[in-house]
């Protein structure tokens, strides 16, 4: 029985650099996401570049969603605290 050798990665395939996405604030991630979508929509990029753009776009969208989720939670906490402090003591 022979062991299968792992296949080398295709050069350039799936090479989206997403390591910095977690450092972006909401506005930065949103702005870059818009630019990425525009590049994909205009076409002209090769398959490998399009895949890399798509992967980075997905990471940027997740980052934006994480920021929005955090903002919603903070608003709900403040709203709950405000309602609690507005209620008269019994």
Image: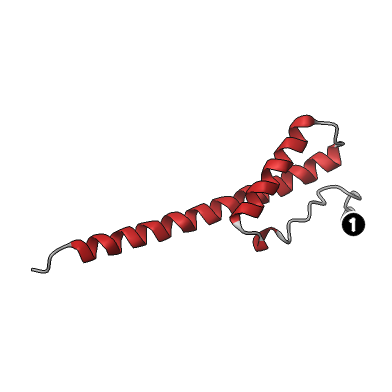
Residue 14 placement (x, y as % from top left):
81, 48
The quarter of the displayed image where residue 79 is located: bottom left
Q: In the picture shown, does residue 16 fall above or below 37?
A: below
Residue 1's spot in the image, x, y percent?
88, 57
Q: Measured from the top left, where is residue 12 in percent x and y?
A: 89, 49
Disc 1 residue crowd, few under 14, some 14–19, many 20+, Cα 10 Å:
few
Instruction: Specify whether 80 is left or right of 64.
Output: left
| Residue in view at x 87 percent, y 56 percent | 6
The front one of 4 and 79 is 79
Residue drawn at 89 percent across, 57 percent down:
5
Colour style of the rendered protein structure: secondary structure
The residue positioned farthest toward the bottom in the image shown: 89
Q: Is residue 60 left or right of residue 7?
A: left
Mark 1 = which residue? 5
Q: Residue 74: name its quadrant.
A: bottom left
Residue 2 versus residue 76: which sits nearer the camera? 76
Q: Nearer the viewer, residue 5 or 33?
A: 33
Classify the position of the C terminus by image quarter. bottom left
**Which residue is depicted at the point 73% across and 56% down?**
18
Between 6 and 52, which is closer to the camera in this rendering? 52
Q: Residue at left 13%, top 65%?
A: 88
Q: Position of residue 37 (x, y in %)?
A: 71, 38
Q: Quadrant of residue 21?
A: bottom right
Total numbered labels: 1
Q: Secondary structure at mark 1?
A: loop
Q: Residue furthest left?
A: 90
């Amino acid at each position: 029985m022979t062991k299968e050798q792992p296949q080398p990665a295709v050069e350039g395939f799936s090479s989206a650099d997403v390591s910095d996405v977690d450092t972006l604030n909401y506005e930065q991630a949103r702005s870059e996401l818009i630019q990425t979508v525009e590049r994909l929509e205009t076409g002209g990029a090769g398959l490998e570049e399009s895949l890399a753009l798509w992967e980075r776009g997905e990471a940027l969208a997740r980052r934006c969603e994480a920021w929005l989720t955090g903002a919603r939670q903070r608003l709900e906490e403040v709203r709950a605290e405000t309602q609690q402090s507005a209620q008269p003591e019994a």
